Image (cartoon, rainbow, N blue to C red):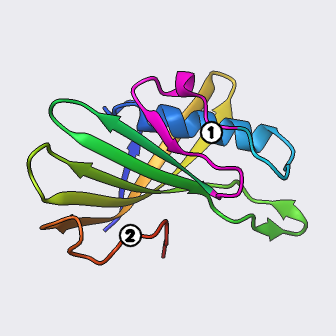
Amino acid sequence: MFLRGLRTSKDGGVLAALRAELAHELSSAPSSSPPPFHALDAPDFATVSDAPQAQDVLLRRRTDSEEVLVSALLAPLIFINQEPLRRVALMKVFVTKPGATPVLHFDCRTSCSVGDDGGVADYGIDAVRYHSSPGAAGEFKGPEFR
């Protein structure tokens, strides 16, 4: 199952956060210590983890009606004829409701295209899972994408 959408959909700020992170990563030279995620890029999300040694950024948004946890990292660089291909962000998105134990789990990827009229974030949902309880699928130890 592969679903596709554009930034015009209601995403709760997830795409804005990832778009800002992608734009920064693609426009800056690699360094040994990446800059921290800035909450201004996605004001509804709080940074849970953006450690210099980690490869991913972990964001959380809590409201009265739901909690959203996003783990995102850039896919490895791939070269064709010594030219790097556009990198995508790989994400795991978890959605829970307060007082309920089921968890919705989405495996996604997103990319940013920059044109004359600005940037457009594009995303795809590679897999959707329903877990009857947070530990039903085993302990989550970080992103692992297929």
Q: Are marks 1 and 2 in contact (CB under 8 Å)?
A: no
For the residue carrying disc 2, how many other residues have a C-alpha within 10 Å: few (<14), some (14-19), or many (20+)? few
The residue shown at (55%, 21%) is 40
Q: Choose top left, top right, bottom left or bottom right for residue 10.
A: top left
Residue 117 image point, x, y percent:
63, 21
The residue shown at (48%, 66%) is 142
Q: Nearer the viewer, mark 1 or mark 2?
A: 2
Residue topped by disc 1:
21
Residue 85 image point, x, y percent:
74, 59
Magenta highlight on residue 54 = yes
Q: Amino acid at mark 2?
A: Phe
Q: Choose top left, top right, bottom left or bottom right for residue 59.
A: top left
Q: Is residue 96 above or below residue 144?
A: above
Q: Earlier in the sequence, mark 1 or mark 2?
A: 1
* Badge number at residue 140: 2
Q: Amino acid at mark 1?
A: Glu
